Image (tube, rainbow, N blue to C red):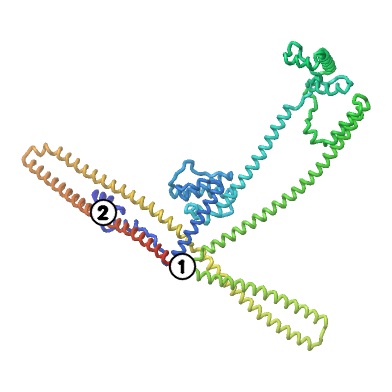
Amino acid sequence: MEDTLKQAKKKSIFFADDANTSSNDLSSFTKRSTVKAPANAREGELSQMEDTDSEQKYQEIIELLVTGGYFRARIQGLSPFDKVVGGMAWSITASNVDVDGDLFFQENSNIRQKIALSEELIKSLRRMKCPFPLQAQQIQGLNYPNLFPIIRWLIAKVIETREETGDLLRIYSENASCAFVHQVENRYKPSRKFRKAAATTGSTATPQETLLEYGKLHRLSRVTPSSGDKSAAAAKLEQALGQDKDGGHGSGEADEEEKRIQKMMKSMSGVDSQKINKISGGILKSVVATDEINDLAHRYSEMDVDGPSGKAMGEKLHRQKVAALDKQISQRQEELKRIAKLRQELQERVDQLQNDLAKRQAFNARIIAETEKLDALETPENTKMLQALRSLVLLNETLVAQEQMFKDSCKKQMLEYKAKIEELVKGGGGSAEDEDDAERRQQIEEAFEADLEKFKKLKQLLNKKNRDISLLQRYLDELPSRAELLQYQRQFIELSEQSDAKLTETRQYYTTYNTLDDKRQLLDNELSILQSIQTKYNVAMSSKTNKEMFIKSMDNIIAGIQEVLSKSEGKRAHEKSKHTSLSDQYITLVEQERNYYKYTKEFQEECRKNEVLQSTLSELTAQ
C-alpha cells in the first residue's frame, strides 16, 4: 500500500512518464495557437495601414514632447513605452500635479508594473479633469491614436502652467525691485539736522541757512593757501599776475565767512529726525503737479514768510490744496468703484462664455469620439451590415419627416374646417345645405379615421424599424475592432509566454522532488538491509543451518537489487534514446527555421526587385 501511494505521488501532469494520461495532458496544456497570416490581401493591407498610422502618430507624439521641452524623447536607445509614458509623467509633473510612481527606474518592466504605472497616470489625469477617456491597457499596449489627443492636451497644459509661473515670477521680481528702490531712497534721502530759531535777512543767508539745516557746508569764498605751502612755480605765477598783494584780503574774507557760519549755527537748534514729516521729491511730484509746485514756490518767494499775513496766506493755501486733493481722491474713488463694477460684470460674462465654450468643446469632443468609434467599427466583414444600417437610419429620418409633414397638414386642415364650421354656424343656411354639410362632415370624418389608421400603422412600422436598428447597434457595439483584437492577441501571447515559463519552472521542481525522493527511498532500503544484516549476523553464524538460511536471504536481496538496477538502467537507456531523438529533431527544426528566414529574406528581396521593375515598366508605359 505504501509503495502504491509513493508511485501515485510521483505521477503528475507535468511529466511524460505515464504513457496513457500525462503526455496528453501536457500537450493539451502547453498547446498554444500561433499567429495566423491575414486571410486575404485586404486584411494585409488594413494591417499595414494601421501600422503606418500608428507609426505616424508615434512620430507626432515624439515631436509634441520635444516641442514641450521633454528632450529625453530624442534618445534612440529608449523603448517607445519609456518615451511615451515618461513624457506623460513629465507633462503631468510640469503641470503642478503629482504622480505616484516608483522612485527607482526599471528599464524592462513586466506587465503588472506597466499596468500599475498606467493606472497611476490615469488617476493624475482624472485629477487634472482631462476631457479625453483613457484606459490602462491603452497605455500599456501603446495605442497611439488614443494617446495622441491626451498628450497634445498635456503639452498645452504644460505651456499654460509655464506662462502662469512666468507671470508670477515677473510680478515677484517687480515687487522685489520696487522694495529695493524704496529702501535705497529711504537710506539716502536728505535728513534735516537743524532748524533756524529766528529770521535772517539777506539773499545770501537764506540758501546758506537751508544748506546748514541739512548738514551741508558750502563756502562762498576760496581760502588761499599760505606762502609756506606754495611751490616755487606758484610763487612765480602770482608774482607775474600781480596777485601777491591780495593774499591778506583773501584771508580776511575767509575769516568773515567763518564768523557768519558760526553766527548762523548759534541761531539754529537740533531737530529730532523721528518727528519730522518726511516726503521725497518723487512722491511730491506724483501728488502735486509740477506747475502747481512752481506756482507755490513763486508765491512764497514774493511774500514775507515771517509776518502774520504770510502765515495766514500759507495756511489758506494749504487748506485749499488739501480740499483740492480730497476732491480728487473722492473722484478717483468713485471712478474706481465704477471700474470695479464694470470689471465684475465683464468677469461674470467671461465666466459664462467660458462655461459655454467648455460645454461646446466637451460636446464636440464626444461627437468626435463617437464618430471615431463608429469609423473603427467598419471592417470588410460588417460592411454590408453597416450599409443596411445606414439605409434603415435614412428610412427612419424620412419617416420622421413624413410624420411631421402629415401632422402639419392635418393641423392646417383642422383649422380650415373649424373656420368653415364657424362660418356656417354664423351664416345659418337652409336644411338642404345642412344635409350637404353633414354628409361632407361624415366624409371628412371617415377620411380622418382612415388617415389616423394609416398613421398608426406607419408609427408601428417606425417602432419596429427602430427596434431593429437598436438591435443592430448593440450587435455592432459587441463586435471588437481590429485594434482591440490585435491588443487582446498580444496580451494573450504575453500571458501564454508567462505560463510557459511558469510551467517549465514547476516541471523542474517536480523533477528535482522525484529524484530526491527516489534517492531517499534507496538510502532507506540500504539502511534497513544493513541493519538487518548487522542484527542477524551473530545469530546466523551460530549454526550451520542458520548460516545457510542467511546466505540464501542475502542472495535473494542481491537478486532484488540487481533487478532494480537493471530496470533503472533500462529506463536510463530509454530516456537517453529519447533525448537523442529530441536533440536530432531540435537540430532539424533549427535548420528549418534558418532556411525559413533565409528564403523569406530572398523572397522579400525578389518582391522589392519586382516592385522596382513594375514601377519602371509603368513609367515606360506612361512615356
Does residue 167 sit above or below 283 in this rendering? below
Q: Position of residue 618 (x, y in %)?
A: 45, 68
Marker disc for residue 48: none
Crowdedness of circle 2 by 10 Å Cα count: few (<14), some, many (20+)? few
Query: Which SS class for mark 1?
Result: helix
User: Front-most of 234 and 258?
Assistant: 234
- Please name the amino acid that badge 2 sits on: Ser
Residue sitting at 34 percent across and 58 percent down?
Answer: 597
- Please name the amino acid that badge 1 sits on: Glu
Crowdedness of circle 1 by 10 Å Cα count: few (<14), some, many (20+)? few
Task: Please tell me which of labels 2 and 1 falls first in the chain.
Answer: 2
Horizontal side of 298 relative to 449 (left or right) equals right
User: Front-most of 544 and 371?
Assistant: 371
Q: Position of residue 415 (x, y in %)?
A: 75, 76
The residue carrying mark 1 is: 619
The residue carrying mark 2 is: 583
Q: Position of residue 177 (x, y in %)?
A: 68, 35
Asked whether residue 128 appears in the rendered view, the answer is yes
Q: How many angstroms separate mark 2 from mark 1 (CA)? A: 54 Å
Does residue 469 sit above or below 572 in this rendering? below
Query: Which SS class for mark 2?
Result: helix
